[in-house]
Image (cartoon, helix red, strand yellow):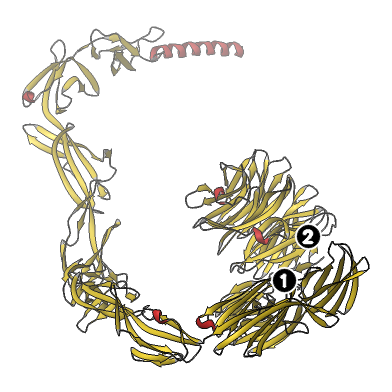
Amino acid sequence: MKLQVLVIVTVITLAVSLVASSQLYYGVAYGCGRIVIVGESGGVGLISVMGNSGPYSTVGVHGVSILYSVAVGGCMAVAVGVSQGGGPVFIIYNLTNGAYNVININGTGALYGVAYGDGYFMALGSVNNTGLIVLTTGVGYSIIKPIGFKALYGAAYGDGGFLIVGEGLNGAALGFYNMSTGSLINLSSKLPSNYNYVLYSAAYGPLGFMVVGEGVVNSSGYLIQVPVAGIFNISNGEFKDLSMYLNQYSLLTSVTYIDYEYVFAGSTSSGDGGYGYYSIYGLTPLYNTIQGGNLYLPLILYSITPISPGVLYVVGNDGSSSVASREAIPVIYNVTLLTNTRNALIKLSGPVSLSITPNSTIPLPQGQYTLLAQAEGYYNVTERVIVDSNEVINLMLSRVRLCNVTVRVMVNGTSEPVANASITLVSNWPNANKYVALSNGSGEASLMVVCNNYSMSIKARYFIGESENININSSVTLDVDLTPIVNVTIRAPNEAGEYRVIMSGVVNDSIILGNASLFNLTLSRVGLIRLFTIRLINGTVQYLGETIIHLKPGLNVINITWRTPVIEDMGVKPIIPGNQSVLIYLNLSKPGNLTLIISTNGLRIFTLNETNITSLQLVRNFTNNGAYTVCAYTWSLFNGSIYIDYGPLCIMVNVVLHSELIVMDESGLALKLSGYYLGNETVNVTLPLVLTLGNGTRLIYNGSIFNGEYIANNSFSIRLSRMVNYLDVLWIREYWVRVNVLVNGLPINSTEGWFREGYVIKYPMFVYFNNGTRLINETPVTVIVNKPLTVTVNYTRQYNVTIIEYSRLGLINETWLWVNSDSILRVMPRPVVNINSSVRLIPRTPVVEVTVNEPIIINVTYVIQFLVTMVKYSKLGVFNETSEWVNSDSIIKITNTIIELSNLTRLIPRVNSIIINVTGPMIINESYTPQYLLTNVTTIDESPWMFEEYWVNASTRLNLSPTPVLSLGNSTRLILSGILVNGKPINSNQLVVNAPLNVTVMYLKQWFISISVHTLNNTPLTIISGWVNASSPIISSVKWGNLTIRLKEPLIVNASMVNQPINAEADVAYRVFKVTDSLGLPEPFVTVMVKCGEYSVRQVSNAYGIIKPLVPINEACLLSKPAVGYYSIALIIFTVTVVLLIVLSRRLR
């Protein structure tokens, strides 16, 4: 098993771990120094915790069928999957001690993905065919069922929330859960149209969130799943599709971020596990593969995670066995590419391919690169480098040189040119310059090319192409011969007979053709072919004449004719006056051979022989005056002899030589001088120095050039000494231009005059003066004079305004600005300049408003302020802390007042007022003493008598000792009945004030009275004196000894009875009772309880058993006494004694 990194031709092989077929790995995460792998083994969820030295532990989680994903936060892992009951399940696993807890979610479904961030694990899946999100910190969990999501497969934390991916109702789904607001936004509309199936995973990096998954495309009527990947930026909502990089993948399931790279994993088109990189610098993704152990089942990498800088861990399976492997990502080096020109473009090819500008630093994976530097005006430079460290690479480009190349293309073996030949020059690598040109009628083509080595190819129709390598380092003329392809067809006429054709020239042969027959011939050269034709018919030889044809490349058709050519039309037309140049023309009745002869004074000066022509046009220039004869005749050649077929025809031409004057004049004044003149004729030329054309335009005479010589005068003569003479009149075109300069809308300057065409009028953006004044035109005026113009330049006057901000601490800031004149400048100083946390500066004036009509200096002064903190406290603690900024050297007076609280409590200051000079930051501590309200109420018989309130300092000790008896005189007094504090009796007179108190001192009013009590028969019983409570003045009984005697009528005491005799009749009388026992014998000297109603009295009976108690009348009385009295006891003793004596006496006997 091997890992292949497909970068150009480099293959890197890494070790891969292949685990037992019973274990299928689906998820991996790293944290707490451990690698955590999850999956399933034999239908049971599997958790394997590994370190650098091997597995720490492998746990089969019973009740769990498959675990799909895992995430680690701190030393806690959360694995998710499906329970054996078919429901979502997640496991909280402690990586420190191996303890775990299985949590099932009600419903049918599964949890497929989990991510960690912001202290939370987010698990994702589906339940009952709807999306499911579970949030947990490891203690407890909450469930979210988002609307519009069919199933969720992955998430990644970043930008303050979790990006979630999965499957929506109509394709792939994308959402963002904001952790601060707890809101979920559906972002599926941001996905491109090809993201129409599902997204499996997400990862966060500097470019945003990368998501991977599958899309569906229609190919020839079949729906095919294809991998998709892209980067979503949550801040601007932009989505960048990267699917164009995924041709080698069939499926993507996982993505992570490490060391400037997004790394995505899945399966390749070849069935191997594959993962690739996408750099944050936009480099083309690298492509890695891992081969599986099963040749028939594709290997899928399901999860990938960073475990250390530059190292990844990947897991996957092919359905029968799993892979788990540490993979090193490519080493990235910073490479600086420098060139000696800034406009260069550098192209790299190697592990990554990209184009960059020079003098920049880029991160590149380790490997071999080919660098190509290109710049306009420079030769391309190529260099192969091996990137294995941070380095600087200099690519020096050389200025190109231009060479003029003339290519002459001729027919091979002749001097005939090849027209319209395609000439292509391609410079050798790395300078792939390409030039293409067509040869003209002379077979020539001129090209201006960059001096270099070239591959030259030349092609032309009906020619065999040629190619060669040439070194062009200077201007050069190249002669190239092309081999022609000449096809010849000779056709015999339809007329009966046998035709013998004798050929000479490029072909020396003879042929015999029947009527209407053909003869075909292919040649590799051009030239003249002579055909002498004899017709044999009925034993007669008929001479048909000779045909001469110039064979050209391509198809040449020669028709044998038996009719003799005749000159049907011939003439001479003058081209230049005096027949100096004439056009000689003639037409033949059919193709034939023609000879044209020009002679004068009996001397032949020109002979022209043409073969196989039907017409002729010839321009002939004569160089001498005189009479010339032009004669023409047609002819045939037979057996080496010429036979005239027709002619000669002759025309006389009288020649008088002229000179041509060609005038070029922009004004048109001298154009009328153009024409033909007699040889050596003198022409006078007069031109104005100034020619006004109107509409603000004129021409200024600037001399003339005659036959290459400059003439400065505007009036001159020229002698036409050449056949063709050239006069070029030079003018300078000028336009009337007016420039108005306005300042603040008012004209200050106006300039007008004639300006030469093309003259550039510039007025700068700024015009500075030395007095703090300038003029500004926001748009600089640049006018090219190409017509009459009126230009208005609008300047605004500005004055320099200096704003100086200072305080006693020194200069704060100095600002210079230009302000339009007469404008109102509002300077709004910074409201606060913080020096530190307790010292700041504030402007004396919040707004400074001035009208700017001259250069001014505005002084903005700042006042120093110190932070003054007033802390008010008492023994109860700090109850108020106020901070205020106070101007330096301010004298503040702090007047302290009593602070009333709402609970019968107040605070009083220890110091009423203080005066402080603020010279720096300070903290003022103000001490207060808490006081509680003491309410003292004195009552008489529960009615308020006196009411007093006092404020008492906290912790004050009070001694509550009111006077126990207050004499009011007139036998009246008050007695203390009790003390209540806050409505409750107190146990001690000592009291500490720690809260508001309500003290109630209770007195009872009493009168002193004397009552004479007598019985019903008016027998004085007793005199009773004492104090009676005014609150209970009714006396219904009195004490007599230790007896309580009820009065016959209750006595109601009032104040008028004080010091007055009071008589009362007791409802009692003496009654006689005889006390007997149960034997009926008197009961002497026994205590008898007599109870009459509620009245009771004890009395001892006399010797006769008689008692006379004082008891109420009209009451039934009950006497309580012993059952046996003294007399009965004595009788009983006597009787017993007698009985004992009798018994004893009988025994003695």
Seen in the picture, residue 783 relative to 1007 is either above or below; the reply is below
Residue 670: where, in percent of width, then height? 38, 81
Residue of label 1? 566
Residue 848: where, in percent of width, then height? 18, 68
The picture quadrant where one finds residue 276 is bottom right
Q: Looking at the image, which residue sits at the far right?
A: 539
State left or right for residue 360 relative to residue 963: right
Residue of label 2? 272
Check disc 2 and report its element: helix, strand or loop: loop
N-terminal-most mark, 1 or 2: 2
Q: Is residue 273 visible?
A: yes
Q: Nearer the viewer, residue 812 or 1098?
A: 812
Q: Nearer the viewer, residue 68 or 765?
A: 765
Residue flagged by tag 1: what amino acid is it? Val
Residue flagged by tag 2: what amino acid is it? Asp
Residue 307: where, in percent of width, then height? 67, 66
Q: Nearer the viewer, residue 45 or 536?
A: 536
Marks 1/2: CA–CA distance? 88 Å
